[in-house]
Amino acid sequence: MEEKLIDLLFKYKDAFATDKEPLGAIIGHEVDIILNVEKPYPPLLRRTACPDSPRAVEALEVHIKELMDLGLLRKVGHNQQL
């Protein structure tokens, strides 16, 4: 059983995250993310928009930069259409 699992993992190794592809490389599967911003707000939206601790803010900024470097996020102006 373990050998079958290892064979399967190696067969699909390109789908897994690596140091060069930190999010994996599955192609052809789209995901729709539906955000609920209508009242009553979900519990997570009731929290403050940014962590209070300076370390948490710094970690968040590092993570956002990584996502921007990967091309998953980009900065937009307040009047720019997405």
Image (cartoon, grey):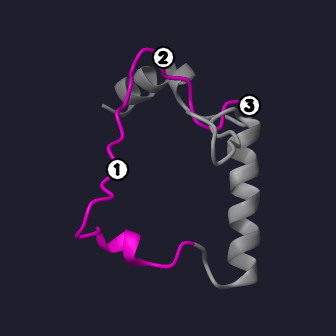
Decide if residue 58 is on the left or right side of residue 53: right
The residue where tag 1 is placed is: 35
The spot of residue 8 in percent (x, y) is 40, 22
Q: Tag 2: residue type?
A: Ile
Q: Is residue 45 above or below residue 80?
A: below
The residue where tag 3 is placed is: 20
Task: Give the farthest residue toward the bottom.
Answer: 53
The residue under the point 74% across, 31% down is 20
Check residue 27 in the rendering and tell me which mark sits there, or answer none.
2
Q: Residues within 10 Å of mark 3 (few under 14, many from 20)?
A: few
Decide if residue 37 is on the left or right side of residue 76: left
Judged by depth in the image, the label closer to the viewer, 1 or 2, is 1
Decide if residue 77 is on the left or right side of residue 45: right
Q: Nearer the viewer, residue 3 or 52?
A: 52
Q: Which quadrant of the figure contains the N terminus?
A: top left
Decide if residue 71 is on the left or right side of residue 15: right
Q: Over which residues does the magenta segment extend?
A: 21-49
Q: Is residue 73 above or below residue 78?
A: above
Q: Which quadrant of the figure contains the C terminus?
A: top right
The spot of residue 17 in percent (x, y) is 59, 35
Q: Nearer the viewer, residue 54 or 24?
A: 54
Q: Quadrant of residue 61?
A: bottom right
Judged by depth in the image, the label closer to the viewer, 3 or 2, is 2
Secondary element under disc 3, as helix, strand or loop, is loop
Q: Tag 1: residue type?
A: Leu
The residue under the point 38% across, 70% down is 44
Q: Residues within 10 Å of mark 1 (few under 14, many from 20)?
A: few
The spot of residue 46 in percent (x, y) is 38, 76
The spot of residue 48 in percent (x, y) is 51, 79
